[in-house]
Image (spheres, rainbow, N blue to C red):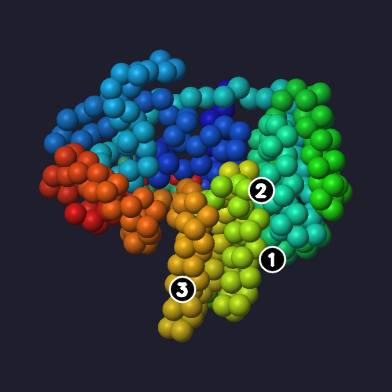
Amino acid sequence: MFFPIDPGADASLGGMAATRCSGTNAVRYGTMRDNVLALKVVLANGEVISTARRAKKSSAGYDLTRLMIGSEGTLGIITELTLRLSGIPEAISSGICPFPSVEAACNATILAIQSGIPVARIELLDALQVKACNAYSNLTLPETPMLFLEFHGTEASVAEQSQRFGEIAGELGGGPFDWATRAEDRTRLWQARHDAYWAARRLRPGTQALSSDVCVPISRLAECVTATQRDAAESRFIAPIVGHVGDGNFHMLLMVDLADPDEIKRAEALLERLVDRALAMDGTCTGEHGIGQGKMKYLAAEHGEPALAAMRAIKRALDPLDIFNPGKIISL
Ligand SMILES: Cc1cc2nc3c(=O)[nH]c(=O)nc-3n(C[C@H](O)[C@H](O)[C@H](O)COP(=O)(O)OP(=O)(O)OC[C@H]3O[C@@H](n4cnc5c(N)ncnc54)[C@H](O)[C@@H]3O)c2cc1C
């Protein structure tokens, strides 16, 4: 068995649940929301509650598990988790596929998902990020937009999935789709994907990397990513993009010189436009990193004031003295 959530960081299970994190496997296995069955939580009044039992489904009362997942430590402290594990697939194949444009890569993703190929991972790296990975991980990938993919199943089914994806990529001007079932080849590629953040930071040494993510309906993904790339270039930033594109989710990493007030202003404006763009496409201001303090200002635009008032009422009811992460997500 294995636990499929892979947040790309050395995270604790409590932190992963608290941020409702996901990562590269979510397109097939879901997020923390889908992979936590029950929690034990210490409330602000000192009571310890169990949010659910091990039954696969239940319609007994409010779903406190889902309330706590993504609450970013503002409603209680998670001390125990009951997790759903998945079977390790009999066969895994991985592949990389170059595309002439980000749009073609996104469209191949959409088509693959719409055709029912059960991709386990489908990750976009834009040309800048591929360049960064080549330098950091000693690779020689063509420096164009690239999809990294993984298929899980039996030997026969992963071969079929890979072949079908290769055909889709070809229809959209992408390819060749190189795929490998050898564990060492797979590990090398995915390690490079895992190190994407550190690779990107080397693109502009001495600056701070500001990472932001948004998530949009997958049908709007190509449009959102290309508009964001254009915006970053016009704002004169080095800003590689990586995306869990099967979910319509992508991250922009902005290298910012924090000693330059003008640059900080431009970066803030660019990040605001990124969120505005995602919301205008019926997306969300964060697919996985959470609200914290930095994105509190977008919550009203995303959910509306009445929903925010409901969140405040929950916070007041469970933590009337505001002792758990005060000033995060919503301010009382
Ligand atoms: C390089 C990098 C790459 C990342 N990539 C991804 C990605 O691809 N996908 C993704 O989803 N996320 C990604 N993340 C974010 C990552 O998921 C979160 O940072 C992580 O899940 C937080 O867990 P943590 O244990 O580090 O928690 P912390 O950072 O310690 O805490 C995070 C929040 O959770 C609260 N918290 C922590 N533990 C508990 C607990 N036991 N009970 C209640 N509240 C608690 C804290 O108060 C805080 O508000 C990335 C982060 C980094 C640094």
> In the figure, residue 141 lies in which quadrant?
bottom right
Quadrant of image for the N terminus: top right
Residue drawn at 57 percent across, 32 percent down: 29
Gap between marks 1 and 3 measured at Cα: 21 Å
Local SS, label 2: strand
Determine crowd level at label 3: few under 14, some 14-19, many 20+ residues with C-alpha closer than 10 A.
few
Gap between marks 2 and 1 measured at Cα: 14 Å
Residue at which label 1 appears: 128
Given residues 216 and 207, the one toward you in this image is 216
Q: Taking 276 as reference, is 183 above or below it?
A: above
Q: Is residue 146 visible?
A: no
Residue at which label 3 appears: 269
What percent of the width, then of the height, locates residue 196? 62, 56
Mark 3 or 2: the one toward you: 3
Residue drawn at 51 percent across, 62 percent down: 277
Whether label 1 touches label 3, CB < 8 Å: no
